[in-house]
Amino acid sequence: LTTKTGFIRGEPVTNALEKVLKESGVDEMIKKYDELKGSDNSGYLFSEHMLHKVGHDLLRKNMVDEALIVFRKNVQEYPDSFMANDALAETFLKKGDKKQAVRYFKKSVKLDPGYEYGKKMIAEIKTKNE
């Protein structure tokens, strides 16, 4: 039995995005992301983890609006990602948008039916809104 292992070569796209974010802001960073992703030979690696990292870096700096933009983009790019939907739910909750938070917590629970925290948050938010 032999197993073939392939290695993906390239630079994480976050290396390019973080520079644009610092110099020009989140909207320009999203444009750069789209530009690089649309290029067949950009040499960058893309995954849901890349935008997730950028979004959490923004949250750590209390840049919630900017993080929301990044997490929305991540859900757009990876709609079936539990991680992307959960991060968006948490960010909407942080902003006080409970309706959108519930929407994305529900999607997270649908993607991972064993996600007890998401179920708990949906119940808590609904209880508080009654």
Image (cartoon, rainbow, N blue to C red):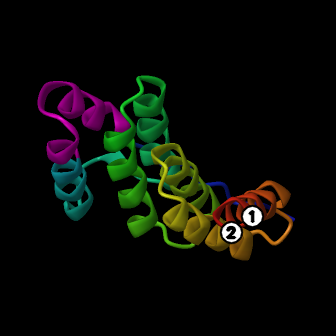
Report whether residue 12 is seen. Answer: no
Q: Label 1 is placed on what type of residue? A: Thr
Q: Quadrant of residue 109?
A: bottom right
Residue at (44, 29) in percent of width and height: 57
- Mark 2 element type: loop
Q: Are marks 2 and 1 in contact (CB under 8 Å)?
A: yes
Q: Label 2 is placed on what type of residue? A: Glu
- The quarter of the image holding the N terminus is bottom right
Say the numbered circle drawn on residue 61. Answer: none
Question: In the displayed structure, would residue 22 be above or below residue 92?
Answer: above
Label 2 crowd bin: few (<14), some (14–19), many (20+), radius 10 Å: few
Q: Is residue 4 magenta?
A: no
- Mark 1 element type: helix
**Left or right: residue 38 compared with residue 126:** left
Read off the residue under disc 1: 127
Part of the protein shown in magenta: 11-29
Question: In the displayed structure, would residue 64 be above or below residue 103?
Answer: above
Q: Quadrant of residue 80?
A: bottom right
Q: Is residue 20 magenta?
A: yes
Residue in front for this viewpoint, 41 or 126: 126
Read off the residue under disc 2: 130
Report, in whole angstroms, how far the alpha carbon at label 2 lies from the one at label 1.
Answer: 5 Å
Q: Position of residue 67 (x, y in %)?
A: 39, 42
- Numbered disc total: 2
**Left or right: residue 70 compared with residue 56:** left
Residue at (39, 38) in percent of width and height: 64
- The quarter of the image holding the C terminus is bottom right
